[in-house]
Amino acid sequence: MSKHANTPDFLLVLTNLPDDQTASQLAQSLVQQNLAACVNVLSPCQSFYRWQGKLEHVTETPVMIKTTQAKYQALETAILSAHPYELPEIIVLNIHDGYAPYLQWLTT
């Protein structure tokens, strides 16, 4: 992973929640706890997946979380403790580059 001089590694963490209210509560909590600089709660989407041998189709609310590698473990713990799903989706994407002032803001 490429790094900016004297800055931590930046992450985009994705998860889905069952509704807007749950997603908004998680977003606010993560920012209040300083585990994320910014959380975007997106429009509901249709999810199709196989769970315990059955094809499922549900409406979910996607959430995009911007954070740093240093905060990731605590962030994951917070997501798991607040998430209503038995097996929550938590996907981490490394941010290799971006607008330097914005990336620096992620560290505050």
Image (cartoon, rainbow, N blue to C red):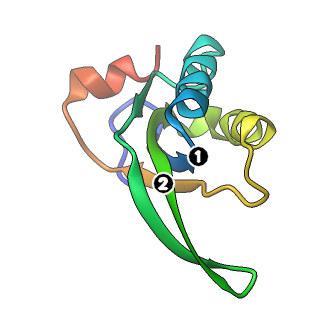
Name the residue at 26% across, 44% down: 97
Instruction: Judge by depth and name the residue closer to the eye, 103 or 7.
Output: 103
Q: Is residue 6 left or right of residue 77?
A: left
Q: Is residue 86 left or right of residue 15?
A: right
Quarter holding the N terminus is bottom left
Circle 2 residues within 10 Å: few <14, some 14–19, many ≥20: some
Instruction: Judge by depth and name the residue closer to the eye, 101 or 65.
Output: 65
Name the residue at 69% across, 42% down: 76
What is the secondary structure assignment of the residue under circle 2? strand
Name the residue at 47% across, 44% down: 61
Instruction: Judge by depth and name the residue closer to the eye, 81 or 71.
Output: 81
Q: Amino acid at mark 2?
A: Thr
Q: Quadrant of residue 89?
A: bottom right
Total residue callouts: 2
Q: Which residue is mark 1?
A: 18
Q: Are marks 2 and 1 in contact (CB under 8 Å)?
A: yes
Q: Which residue is mark 2?
A: 59
